[in-house]
Amino acid sequence: MDTEEFFLPRSREANERLHAMVPGGAHTYAKGDDQYPENLAPVISHGHGAHVWDIDGNRYIEYGSGLRSVSLGHAHPRVIEAVRRELDRGSNFVRPSMVEVEAAERFLATVPTAEMVKFAKNGSDATTAAVRLARAATGRPRVALCADHPFFSVDDWFIGTTPMSAGIPATTTDLTVAFPYGDLAATEELLTRHQDEIACLILEPATHTEPPPGYLAGLRELADRHGCVLIFDEMITGFRWSEAGAQGLYGVVPDLSTFGKALGNGFAVSALAGRRDLMELGGLRHSGDRVFLLSTTHGAETHSLAAAMAVQSTYVEEGITARLHALGERLAAGVREAAAGMGVGDHIVVRGRASNLVFATLDENRQPSQQYRTLFLRRLLAGGVLAPSFVVSSALDDADIDRTVDVVAEACAVYRKALDAADPTPWLAGRPVKPVFRRLA
């Protein structure tokens, strides 16, 4: 057994203070200390570029920054400069500001497949608004979501389908049905079974695997034929796949789409975009029933919209998407080589598009294992790599990637020992990490 220990006493004490005041000890379940090895959940002091420092004084190379939102790196100068310009001019007014005009024009120029846009502060509000709009436009009650995608919203229509459904009436959950990703026949069967009941199909257009050839176009045809609204959740694919998201890359236009995460580089901004005839139902220039689309006090906060405009300019002018892919390809190749070299190439598996890499930790039977994930995360943390995923930011450089690969190789050596023993327990030093969605705390 490797006896080297890594302690985070100040972070441990701060986590206790958090749990005493904040349910779950964090404001996002995916940031909870249950997602990290016991007593090794660092509390962050600050970040710059691709690095963060914890309150114990340790520096880490960081991946998946801000749950994929900080794709340009922390405190990116162009974004911060744009934000600072607005801070002295006021952040929120009783009427729209000129920044809202400019931000909408910039977004629609960046995502030309959309005709109108409305901004909000988080992804859940945007996706729920899309669902509400689809129901209003079609007069149908049911929502069909992709069963293979992990998260769409904190609202009842989605959370009721997860193991954390406490507090959500079954009558609400019964209105949500699911279809498998990549299977057009199964989706058509679902639409036929609930003929004239399904308001929309909502999915991430791409995730850890590329869409099968013709799949997205096939969904577009199914939605048209069955009279339902096609919604792309582009929270992750937006900017990371192309500046115009997956719809821009694959050339399939949804009726509605939602963006967030990378849009603000950590600042709170999301967007619902789509066809004018649908979006205008939530407006004033029609004679029909009004639809409560989105109405948020802080949705048009000036500095967040300025951040979004700076992000879009940076992506387009500096070729950020291509840089993310190049960095991810270098990282994926290095990790795969390191894992193979240590004899664990079939157990530490890197998956996904180069700009959005995740890893799987498999046991001696090649089954997903939270225990082996715990072992792997412990070794990464001890080596100065904070990586719940391998999602890159453009602030990383080749030296960061090479250092990460060296740390992964060291972790793989320990992983090999655990596999040989057919028991990772001696290397865990506490309880294993846990899935975010589970029924019991």
Image: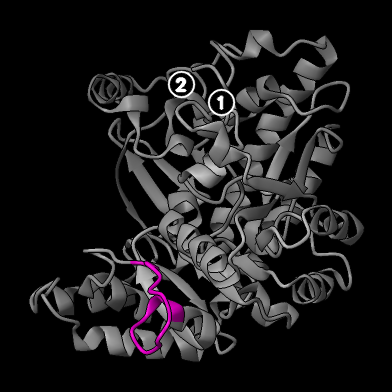
Find residue 401 and report its image quarter.
bottom right
x 63%, y 14%: residue: 427
- With respect to residue 75, does 338 lie above or below? above
Q: Position of residue 65 (x, y in %)?
A: 46, 52
Location of residue 83 by image quarter: bottom left
User: Residue 317 location, x and y as percent?
Assistant: 48, 88
Judge the density around disc 1: few (<14), some (14-19), many (≥20) Cα neighbours within 10 Å. many
* Residue neighbourhood size for the residue with mark 2, other residues' Cα within 10 Å, grouped as few (<14), some (14–19), many (≥20): few
Q: Is residue 256 above or below residue 101?
A: above
Query: At 59% from the left edge and 28% from the top edge, which residue is drawn?
Result: 163
Region of the chain picked out in magenta, as a range: 281-294
Cβ–Cβ below 8 Å for labels 2 and 1?
yes
Counting from the top left corner in percent of width and height, residue 270 is at 41, 66
Label of residue 6 in the image: 2
Residue drawn at x 88%, y 55% as measured from the top left: 189
- Inspect the magenta stretch and tell me whether residue 213 lies in it: no
Secondary structure under badge 2? loop
Give the residue number, with chain letter if any, for mark 1.
378
User: Residue reaching furthest front?
Assistant: 288
Q: Is residue 376 above or below residue 44?
A: above
Residue type marked 1:
Arg
Q: How many marks?
A: 2
Q: Secondary structure at mark 1?
A: helix
Question: Mark 1 or mark 2, which is nearer the start of the sequence?
Answer: 2
